[in-house]
Amino acid sequence: MQQPYLEGFRLSVEQKRFWNLEEQGSNLTSQLVLLVNGCLEIEKLTLSLRSVVAQNEALRLSFEYLPGMKTPVQILNDFEPLELKRLDAKNRPKDLAIESTLQEEREAFNLSKGLASVLISFSENEHALLITIPAISADTRSLINIAQRLSNFYLGIDSETEEIGFIQFAEWQNELLSSEDAAEGKSYWQKMHQQEFGRVFLPLEKKQNTHTAFNFSSESRQIGCYHTMKETVAEINSSVENFLVAAFQLLLARLSEESNFVLAYRTE
């Protein structure tokens, strides 16, 4: 019997990183909770959700291994109308119902699904829509886009935009990394990494004890001028994140009196 022909595309760099974490036993999903107050048309919501999936190819991806490959390829599937799962939680606390359902969806989810959705109803005018997607296919920005497009479809607002498909982006990224320019760039950063940058010492810094375990913590502060900062960086086509990183670099340079150092930070 002839085997079906399977056409797949390479994973992007970030997808490969997430896949390795998935292989190590981490169930990595992105989840979105939308609270809905007021009269909700269930059929209209279902059709809106289907429209979002039909428009976004990243929500129709599955992942399969091809012979001789250590990492899978991503398969772009044809659109199939999804069903919105319903859950009646009229006699349950809202927070508990949402949290337990999110946990159940995480545990039941697998990478053969592009998107799973559950509508929890607390009363006739109170609902929560829970959406679960593989983290390998959607980050925080993707969840925000999904929420916005779902709202637009439900309200009848035209949200069609001409965008580069996710598969196209992943292929472009892989081609870029294998090009001659990529080899030159890698060589440059390898040389930079091999250079000995002096360690940055800050005033009143405690001496490091090599036998002490590293403990980290975080502390939140409200920035009063956030909206002004946001407007300012928008004028120069930048972001608040980039502005804060640049400010932190300037602060380190001034306190340490070192102008040549490496600052590593994660971006999403």
Image (spheres, helix red, strand yellow):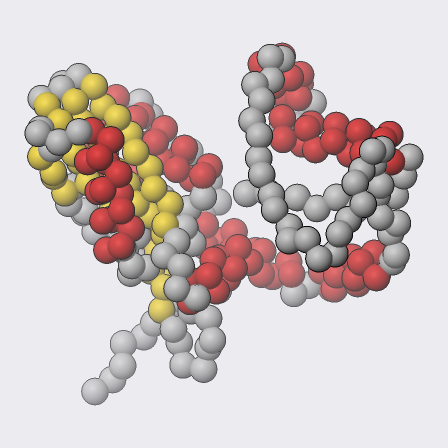
For the residue pair 199 and 228, the one nearer the viewer reads as 199
Which quadrant of the figure has residue 122?
top left
Q: How many numbered marks appear?
A: 0
Residue 55 relative to residue 163: left or right:
left
Residue 55 relative to residue 43: left or right:
right
Q: Position of residue 237 (x, y in %)?
A: 65, 26
For the residue pair 190 and 150, the one nearer the viewer reads as 190
Q: Is residue 128 above or below residue 19?
A: above
What residue is at 87 percent from the left and 58 percent from the top?
195
Image quadrant occupied by the N terminus: bottom left
Q: Residue furthest bottom?
A: 1
Camera sees residue 252? yes
Q: Residue furthest right?
A: 257
Which quadrant of the figure has residue 6?
bottom left
Camera sees residue 181? no
Q: Position of residue 128 (x, y in %)?
A: 22, 30
Image quadrant occupied by the C terminus: top right
Which quadrant of the figure has residue 219?
top right
Residue 24 relative to residue 40: left or right:
right
What residue is at 43 percent from the left and 66 percent from the top?
24
Q: Is residue 232 above or below residue 120?
A: above
Q: Position of residue 76 (x, y in %)?
A: 35, 58
What residue is at 25 percent from the left and 84 percent from the top?
2
What residue is at 56 percent from the left and 18 percent from the top?
222
For the residue pair 195 and 42, the one nearer the viewer reads as 195
